[in-house]
Amino acid sequence: MEMIAARAALAALREGNRRFVNKLKTGSVSGVDSGGGARRRELPPPAVQAPGAIVLGCSDARVPAEIVFDQGLGDLFVIRVAGNIVAPSQIGSVEFAAAAFGTRLVVVLGHTNCGAIHATLEQLARPSREQSRNLRSIVDRIRPALESLLEQDPQRDPRTLEQQAVRANIRMSANQLRHGSQLLEQLIADDGLLVVGAEYSLETGVVEFFDGLPP
Ligand SMILES: [Zn+2]
């Protein structure tokens, strides 16, 4: 893994933002056609926020929601946290977007080869007291999904276990969003809010929606 010194990284971000602003000025920032394709790709973000979907994704640098779904400015309301876990601040963010913008699709987006899942499996296999309290708060949110997997079949081979763990964690997060708040429960029951789980493959780029899909 290449380590980038802070100053160089900061310079790259500044330069990148300058390029971005130039593209905005010249009208070549990518966006997407939403719905009937009425929106032109060249448009800057709409003045009013009206995202088509809320995405709770992992912070992994390789899985930026806007890029993997080919969406533009203003199209997605994205919450990213290591392991796409659900803590009160994530539920609050989803509540906010669903209530304020009327967005009716929530996607929990996990991915193959997730470092947070890996760290949790490690912690289950070899508990270490050295983990920081803050990192532990993430691992502790992932742990229940993996523990029930391990209970079902402790002899699973490690690769299969890791693959199933990623999906179990996505399912758990989606369920926590479905039942973690009165507001969201009510929007699901009465107002068409849909929470689905999906997995992004780092190997192929394909997002597979596998949880909570309408019949
Ligand atoms: Zn991850």
Image (cartoon, rainbow, N blue to C red):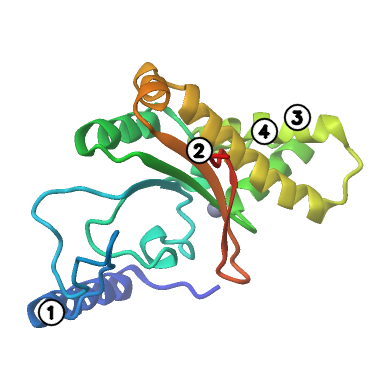
- N-terminal of the two: label 3 or label 2? 2
1 or 3: mark nearer the eye: 1
Amino acid type, label 1? Gly
Instruction: Compare residues 103 and 180 and report the one nearer the observer.
Output: 103
Residue that label 4 marks: 145
Q: How far apart, in angstroms, are the residues tagged by discs 2 and 1?
A: 36 Å
Q: Image point 46% across, 30% down: which residue?
A: 177
Amino acid type, label 3? Ser
Q: How far apart, in angstroms, are the residues tagged by discs 2 and 4?
A: 11 Å
Q: Are marks 4 and 3 in contact (CB under 8 Å)?
A: yes
The secondary structure type at the circle numbered 4 is helix
Residue 126 lies, in percent from the top left, at 77, 39
Q: Is mark 4 within 8 Å of ligand 1?
A: no
Q: To which quarter of the image does residue 114 belong?
A: bottom right
Residue that label 3 marks: 148
Q: Are marks 1 and 3 in contact (CB under 8 Å)?
A: no
Residue that label 1 marks: 27
Badge 4: residue crowd in 10 Å (few <14, some 14–19, many ≥20): many
Quadrant assignment for the N terminus: bottom right
Residue 43 lies, in percent from the top left, at 14, 70
Q: Is residue 126 visible?
A: no
Q: Is mark 1 within 8 Å of ligand 1?
A: no
- N-terminal of the two: label 4 or label 1? 1
Instruction: In the rendered structure, find residue 85 and report the number of the disc placed on it.
Output: 2
Q: Image point 71% across, 36% down: which residue?
A: 146
- N-terminal of the two: label 2 or label 4? 2
Residue 156 lies, in percent from the top left, at 88, 45
- N-terminal of the two: label 2 or label 1? 1
Q: To which quarter of the image does residue 181 belong?
A: top left
Instruction: Compare residues 173 and 162 and report the one nearer the observer.
Output: 173
